[in-house]
Amino acid sequence: MDKALQSMIDNMPEKTGKSLEEWVGILKGKSFSKHSEAVNYLKSEHNVTHGYANTIVTLSKNDTSSEDDLVATQYQGKEVLLPIYHALIAYVKTLGEDVTITPKKGSVSIIRKRQFVLIKPATKTRVDLGLKLKDKPTTDRLGNSGPFGTMCTHRVQLTDVKEVDAELKHWIKEAYSKSI
C-alpha cells in the first residue's frame, strides 16, 4: 500500500473522528448510485474533508468481503484446493507488512512494490503458483512460466497442501526479496 494512503488511514480517527472500518460500516448502511453522492454525504452530514471523504468512499468499494467473494468464486467447484490457497496466503503474510494480497477474477496477485507471486486455481485438482525469479534456472518442480507468460518467470504446480514445503517457501521468499 502507498505510504501516503497508509498515513491517511492511520490519521483518519484523529482527523475525521472515526476509523476507516467505522466509515465503511456507515456507508454499508446507505445505497448511493454514484461515487460523488457518497462523498457529498460524508462531507455534508459528517463534516469530513473532501480528501478523506473521497478516500473513504474509494476504499469502501475495496472492502475485503468483495475480495473474499472473488476468492470464493475462483474456488467454486474446486474447494478441495482451498487448503493449498490458505497455506500460501498464511506464508506470504509472514514475509512483511509491505505485502499486498490482491484477489482478481481468476487469480490472486501477491505484490510488494510489484507482483512477485500469482496464485491461480488452474484445474479442479491443481493450483498454479507463478513466481518472479529472474535469472533462476528451471527444474523439474520449478518449471517455466507456462500460461502465465511474462507475468511470472516460473510456475510450480501444486496438488496437495503438503507441497507448500520449505523449498517452495524459500522460492516465495526469494521472489519477495527480489521485488523491491
Image (cartoon, rainbow, N blue to C red):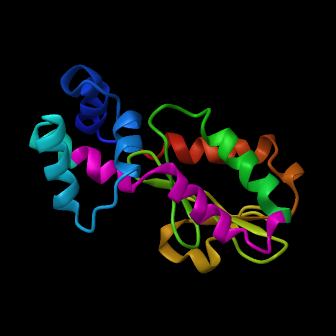
Q: Which residue: 29% across, 23% down?
A: 13
> From the image, which quarter does the N terminus lie in?
top left
Q: Which residue: 82% across, 44% down?
A: 165
Q: Decide if residue 139 is in sight here.
A: yes
Q: Left or right: where does residue 53 sit relative to residue 179?
A: left
**Most prominent secondary structure in the magenta stretch?**
helix
The quadrant where residue 3 appears: top left
Along the line of sight, the residue nearer the viewer: 87 or 151: 87
Count of numbered marks? 0
Picture coordinates of residue 152 (x, y %)?
54, 66
Picture coordinates of residue 103 (x, y %)?
53, 60
Q: Is residue 68 magenta?
A: yes
Q: Which residue: 40% across, 54% down?
A: 62
Position of residue 77 relative to residue 22, above or below, is below
Along the line of sight, the residue nearer the viewer: 108 or 20: 20
Along the line of sight, the residue nearer the viewer: 46 or 2: 46
Position of residue 42 relative to residue 119, above or below, is above
Q: Decide if residue 133 is in sight here.
A: no
Position of residue 81 relative to residue 100, above or below, is below
> From the image, which quarter does the C terminus lie in?
top left
Q: Is residue 41 magenta?
A: no
Q: Left or right: where does residue 176 sit relative to residue 162?
A: left
Picture coordinates of residue 104 (x, y %)?
51, 66
Picture coordinates of residue 145 (x, y %)?
61, 72
Position of residue 144 relative to residue 68, above or below, is below
Magenta part of the chain: 55-79
Q: Left or right: where does residue 64 sit relative to residue 130?
A: left
The quadrant where residue 157 appears: bottom right
Q: Which residue: 63% across, 62% down?
A: 71
Q: Left or right: where does residue 147 sit relative to residue 50?
A: right
